[in-house]
Amino acid sequence: MSHGDPNNPYGPPQQPQQPGYAYPQQGQQPGYGYPQAPPVQQPYGGVPQTMPGTVSGARAMMWVIVGLQVVGAALFALGAIGLNAAKNDDTLKDDSAFQQLVDYSTGKLWALVVFAIAWGVFAAVLATKFNSGGNGVRVTLMVFAIITAVLGLYPFTIIGIVHLVLAILIACFVGGSKGKEWFNRPRY
């Protein structure tokens, strides 16, 4: 038998391979084979390109507020119409509860109708700006949510509980880190 054959299994033990021939040593690049892949990175420096779930939820909550504003405006309008029609009824002139309601004039109810419609339109405009808006829209959304929460507490306490909860969630979702990343992302 020849000990000079490197493929001979009965030959003398072979010397370890030199670096760069079989397997690369630690810290060295491979000398042959497939090229090494570049590191995986998110496009645009890790900024999300799809709307995060919390921000998408805040947008859905804004549309719920728009719907509630439409319902509220309709209820205020129906109340103003009904109050105006009942003012002239002779049978209700002696009712003290009705007289307290009459003191809340129809002009104030119509003002509430206009305010509810304006607030709903403002909410709808903000809800449409979630995809294209920048940091200014984010700040406006947070201010809108805080004012909505305050209005849900004081003048409209019982009816405004839903507005209060939605507004707090919108402010938290838009003001959070994912909301900040979404509204500050680069737009190309």
Image (tube, rainbow, N blue to C red):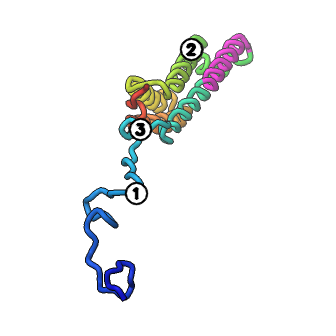
What is the CA distance from the residue labelled 1 to the residue labelled 2? 73 Å
Residue that numbered label 2 is attached to: 114
* Amino acid type indicated by mark 1: Gly
Q: Position of residue 39 (x, y in %)?
A: 37, 48
* 186 or 133: nearer the viewer: 186
Q: Are marks 3 and 1 in contact (CB under 8 Å)?
A: no
What is the CA distance from the residue labelled 3 to the residue labelled 1? 28 Å
Q: Work out whether mark 3 precedes mark 2 in sequence or the reverse, and give the earlier one.
A: 3
Residue at the image point whose x is 39% and y is 29% from the top: 186
Q: Position of residue 59 (x, y in %)?
A: 52, 32
Q: Are marks 3 and 2 in contact (CB under 8 Å)?
A: no
Residue 50 within the magenta-colored segment of the rendering:
no
Residue 85 within the magenta-colored segment of the rendering:
yes
Q: Is residue 158 visible?
A: no
Magenta stretch in the rendered image: 70-90
Foreground tag (3 vs 1): 1
Q: Work out whether mark 1 precedes mark 2 in sequence or the reverse, and give the earlier one.
A: 1
Task: Kindly indicate the quadrant of the structure image that contains residue 179.
Answer: top left
* Amino acid type indicated by mark 3: Pro
Residue 86 placement, left or right of 48: right
Dominant secondary structure (helix, strand or loop) of the stretch shown in magenta: helix
Residue at the image point whose x is 39% and y is 85% from the top: 9
Residue 37 placement, left or right of 80: left
Residue 58 placement, left or right of 86: left
Circle number at residue 33 = 1
